[in-house]
Image (cartoon, rainbow, N blue to C red):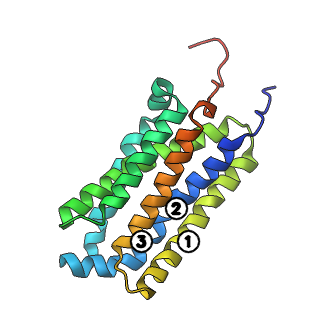
Amino acid sequence: MIAQRKMDVTVVIAFLGFIALGIPGGLLGLAWPSIRDLFGLTASAVGALLLADTLGFMVTSFSSGTLINRFGAGPALLAGSTLRGVALICILFVPSWPTLILAAFGMGLGSGVIDAGLNTYIAGYRSTRLLNWMHGCFGLGATIGPLILTALFAAGLVWRWGYVMAGVAQLSVALLLLLTLGHWRTTSSRQGGS
């Protein structure tokens, strides 16, 4: 029988990481009418934005095992969180629809590393309860997103600031990852063998 790992601060950071992961997903529904009007788009153009995010996500989530094995869980998660945070904040400055799609692709690249990486990491604790709580944190983030954007709209700010706030949340997680980099160790589930 494989022993359960002792919990440490990385579990809390993983939960915060999934909250940050969920926030932008809750923004698009409220932001889309403003985005569509700003760039003169049809309603169906949202598909291009979602596709760019999904393609970026697929690229890194499919290669997350390789990334974690090569660089380690902490550095891979730090890179993904930093990339995603920067892409989210860049949305404040995008001048055109194609650059917004490029930012969405960058968000997806970071998201894929974070999602697959944290799932892999928490699975190492051998606790379905921890995995369930972590995924519940995503739902919490997706709930917080619209609340943030609603408050920003009420304050007279534009939709872009919601993505900046999500980027700040993501970069805060990146800072926590940096401060605890030595704690992010993974253990192989395979004993002996290749």
Frontmost residue, 115 versus 9: 9
User: Is disc 3 placed on a helix, strand or loop?
Assistant: helix
Frontmost residue, 56 versus 147: 147
Determine whether, in the image, residue 144 is placed left or right of residue 123: left
Which residue bears the numbered disc 1? 144
Q: Residues within 10 Å of mark 3 (few under 14, many from 20)?
A: many
Going by the numbered disc 2, the residue's amino acid type is: Gly
Where residue 154 sits: x, y (%)? Answer: 45, 88
Going by the numbered disc 3, the residue's amino acid type is: Gly
Asked if the residues shown at circle 2 and circle 3 are in contact, with their CB atoms under 8 angstroms apart, the answer is no
Residue drawn at 70 percent across, 55 percent down: 133
Distance, label 2 to label 1, CA atoms, is 8 Å
Where residue 80 sits: x, y (%)? Answer: 43, 44
Which residue bears the numbered disc 2? 22
Distance, label 2 to label 3, CA atoms, is 13 Å
In the rendering, which numbered label is found on residue 162? Answer: 3
Residue drawn at 67 percent across, 34 percent down: 124
Determine whether, in the image, residue 63 is placed left or right of residue 180: left
Q: Please indicate, yes or no, whether residue 147 appears anywhere in the rendered image.
A: yes
